[in-house]
Image (cartoon, rainbow, N blue to C red):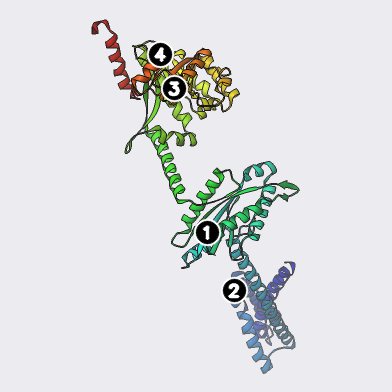
Amino acid sequence: MARKALLARTQRVVDDGLVLVSLILLVWPAANTVGVTSAARLIPLAAAICLGTAMLLVAPERPMLRFAPTAAALAVSAIRHIQGELARGAIWLLLGMAVAVLYRRWAGAGSSKAMLREMTTQNALLVRQAYRDPLTGVGNRKMFLERADFELGETSRTLTAVIVIDLDGFRDLNDTYGHEVGDSLLRAAADRLAANVRANDVVARLDGDEFVVLLSGLEDEQAAIAIADRVLTELHRPLEVNGVKLAVRASAGVAMTAGGEGIDLLLREADQALHRAKLDGGGTTRRFDPEQFALEEQRRKVGADIMRALDAGEFEVHYQPIVDLDGEQTVGVEALLRWQHPEQGLVSPERFLEMAEQLGLLPRLGGWVLEEACRQAVHWQRQFPGFEMNVNLSASQLSNPFLVADVRTVLECTGLRPEHLVLELTESVALTDLEESARILGELKALGVRIALDDFGTGFSSLSHLSALPVDVVKIDRSFVQAMPESGEASVAEAVLHIARTFNLSPVAEGVEHAAQADWLRDLACSRAQGYHFARPMPALEVTELLDKQAEQESPLAT
């Protein structure tokens, strides 16, 4: 660099000198005219200097303009030398200019060659930067997409496959050991990828810790799976990065086509397969499954529809009556979430509750149901004092650290007395973390609400854990009610009722569908039940009508 700078400075000095000297040569005869005074002789010389300076300032980067006086001076001076008009000093100046011009030509040629080499190097570097990932050295997204478009655009009888590879837990490793170790890990992963694919395969880094491999000319589908498995095997080998020994796992998704698909669709399919690999525990390869993809797409659409429905207020609460078997009068209801879809009508909970749980929307939905149900319960209690409201708690609600505060706020806002609210949770949810469940349920009990264990008897170790949970009510699962014999033989429902009495818990039988089951439950001294035999879930208005009808039947004036 120093040599180039010195050469450039020398060229500028020579260029400026050539212009100045050439102008002096042009005015030399006028400065040496016989009979002209010394002062007058200086006038042409001064004019030449000023003109040369002006040309240097006006056009410093235009060699043709700068060297025009030089060319003219050399031509005129050559003629005058032949005619004998030049003095000896001018002749030496002329020879010096010729030498300077030759040097300038040589230096300029060398500089041009150096400049050409530098431009060629810079262009090559720019091309590399445009198609290479700067961190790992493998291809980048642009290079991958262009190669993929080319391969997919060619007519071929073979298969083309895309493998998307993601490092499991990379973000945690990056946070634990720092970005320097993370970058070194990505470079090592890229090296192992490139070393375990075929020479004509394309390896690129898409983003973060996600890599992609383009395989062309495959004879069968198993070839792509074999390459993906081999790559994962190599990635799973422990490696040492900056003195840190790391055991890395990776997952891979494979999608392939015989032609006709664009790269965007193929990448989406590979991403879907990668997602399935991670759901299956990671560290493995999964191939794109069209049927599973269609199911996932449907689930995604349902998720988006749920979000829209929340904002549009399409969800509503229906209530299923809970009756006292001695007289079959409604003494309470269970609040159940329903979705009134504008196009599909009433959507069953089985179609959206699991998705809402996966999307983390059940705490929001459950909080809305709790407030709506409590507000409605207060309205019914004005006419029917002691009327109970049962509301379900999901697993995500139970793990919500603000659950107790939210329940307290709802009770205060609606004015519902705590003892008239029964919070239900399934046995499986309660036993996920017994100690934590017992703590949260204890805090809820401290508010004055009651706790019901739903689907009782279907879980494991029910008896050993009953005493640890602050439960008031057990709801006998419908499967036990449906299995009750018509004869007087013993049944599981009878055993569950016996357990409830042993622990001093109030039993409620679910899923009662016909009168024989209701009669059998009465014989077993079960006090309360719910099911289609008594009433299906219904909107609040229909519950009000049902309660009014029962009140009229009990009124002395009705007889």
Front one among 357 and 3: 357
Mark 4 or mark 3: name the one nearer the start of the chain.
3
**Residue 168 visible to the viewer:** yes
Tell me the element at label 4. helix
Mark 4 or mark 1: name the one nearer the start of the chain.
1
- Pointer 1 and pointer 2: residues touching (CB < 8 Å)? no
Report the residue marked by disc 2: 62
Q: Residues within 10 Å of mark 3 (few under 14, many from 20)?
A: many
Question: Which mark's residue is nearer the viewer, 1 or 3?
Answer: 1
Residue type at mark 4?
Asp
Residue type at mark 1?
Glu
- Is 70 rendered above or below residue 543? below
Mark 2 or mark 3: name the one nearer the start of the chain.
2
Residue type at mark 3?
Val
Question: Which mark's residue is nearer the viewer, 4 or 1?
Answer: 4
Q: Mark on residue 221?
A: 1
Tell me the element at label 3. strand
Q: Quadrant of residue 469?
A: top right
Cα separation between marks 4 and 1: 65 Å
Report the residue marked by disc 4: 523
Report the residue marked by disc 3: 391
